[in-house]
Each structure stands twice: as structure tokens, then as C-alpha cells.
Amino acid sequence: MKHGDFTGLAGDYARFRPGYAPQVATAIVSYVGRNVSDIDAADIGAGTGIWTRMLADRGLHSVVAIEPNDDMRARGAETSRGIGIAWREGSAEATGLPDASADLVSMASSLHWADFDKACGEFHRVLRGGGVFAALWNPRMIETNPLLIEIEARITQLKPGIRRVSSGRSGLTERLTELLMARPDFSEVLYLEGRHCVRQTPEQYLGAWRSVNDLQVQLGPELFGEFLEFVESKIEGRESIETTYLTRAWLARRL
């Protein structure tokens, strides 16, 4: 398994990854500044379509999902059949979309895998004048639940010094506002966030961990297996695990 390659993880990703805070989705669509039914959106690095479906559910004129991984794209197309999402192969740096074809371009939990400058240049090309780019993540707020703190601590016990690529509260997100403000082709940089609570069964909670690419790559199969065994032992007998998620979004308007 390689960093950013979710081949083989699509099933768990589609079934067990939670959605984003609905109030953030509503705010992003509203910020575009057009009638909802007139908005053409492109979701880049769409994965299995968790965020893409949230956009489509808001009654946009059109939604296209761009995803480079065959496994993820196939699962996304399967789980969003009949709701009007067009699935295409492409990447953040080369979407394959026509010039000035979107009012909203988004990347949900995926911008950290892209070449930032090349991706922003591509999004500027795809967006219409005044269109909006939105990058968002959905990290867990483990500090709200002692069980989650204990489980997270086990990762560094297994591999001291491990550096996660992105949890949505580290890495690229620490400097994303400044990076967007420094670009001459975007303006009106805006940050917003919203919390939402998710109750997962033990099966769902373990499934979400199995869908994490970065952790599996850094721990390797043996240590990752030990980690899953530890998690299973800590949640055994529980009816549910309550997790608070913090949807964090950065928006910028195309000049």
C-alpha cells in the first residue's frame, strides 16, 4: 500500500466513513451566491462520494465527481446511482473538465494529497468568474471522549514519532489560510467550521479505522493489525461509540 492509494479500502471507506456537518455544506452552497438550482459543482478527489452526495442532495443544477482511483470511483458511482452525479476519472492537477464550467469546486479530505499550486491553477481554470473553491476536512475531536484519547495514544506507543499526513487539524491546514491569501487568482478567503456528533456501532467504528490509508502505510500490516486488535478490545461490549467531528472548511473566490 502506498500513501494516497486507496485501492482495496473503498468498501470500508464507503460504508463506515461519516459525513460532514450538514450546516457547513449549507453555508458553502449559500456562499457561492447563486440560486441553488443554477449551481454547477465539481467535487475533486471525490473518493466514494460522501461529500459529493451531500452537494447533490441540496438540489444543485449539476454535480460532477472527479476521482483518480478506479476502486474508489467505481464504489462512488455504485453508491450514488440515480441521484444525478456524473463520475469521471481525473485528478486535482488535471481534472479533464472544460474551462469555466463550474460555480463551485470542492476537495473534501483530499487537498493534502495534491500539488497545491498546480491544483489551484486547475481550479481557477475550471471555475467561472466569481466562483468558489472549497477545501474541507472532517477530523475527530478526540478530546471530548477519554476512550478516543486512549485509542489514539496507542498509535504513538506502537510507533513513536509517527507523523500523520493529515487529520484535518494539522499539516496543510495549519497554513492553508495564508497559502490561499497569497494567491493572486483568488480572493475573499473565508474559514468556517461546524461540529456534529456521530454514534457508531463497534463494527462501524472499526470499519472507519480500516479505511485509513495513512495509518496503514506508516504502521505496516503487522503493527496495524495489532492496533486494530487493541481497538477491538477497548470497544468490546459497547453498544456504540460516540465521536464528535469538526468539519473545517476554507473557501476562496476566483478572480
Image (cartoon, helix red, strand yellow):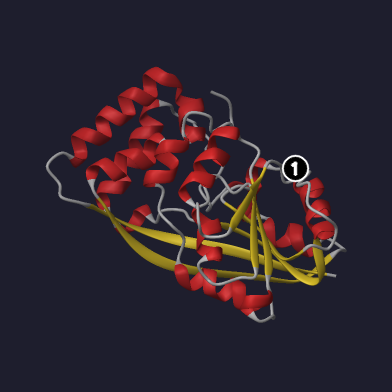
Tag 1 residue: 115
Amino acid type of the residue that numbered disc 1 sits on in the rendered structure? Asp
SS of the residue under disc 1? loop
Residue 141 figure quarter? bottom left
Going 46% across and 33% down the picture, which residue do you hit? Answer: 9
Please tell me whether residue 88 is drawn above or below residue 32 in the rendered image: above
Mark 1 neighbour density, 10 Å: few (under 14) some (14–19) many (20 or more): few
Q: Position of residue 29 (x, y in %)?
A: 61, 73
Would residue 69 appear left or right of 158 to someone viewing this image?
right
Q: Nearer the viewer, residue 54 or 2?
A: 54
Q: Position of residue 62 (x, y in %)?
A: 65, 65
Q: Position of residue 103 (x, y in %)?
A: 73, 68
Going 77% across and 44% down the picture, which residue do you hit? Answer: 93
Position of the C terminus, as image quadrant, is bottom right
Q: Nearer the viewer, residue 117 or 33?
A: 33
Q: Residue furthest top?
A: 222
Residue 130: tell me if it is visible: yes
Residue 248 figure quarter? bottom right
Question: How many marks on residues?
Answer: 1
Going 25% across and 47% down the picture, which residue do you hit? Answer: 147
Would residue 125 appear left or right of 90 to someone viewing this image?
right
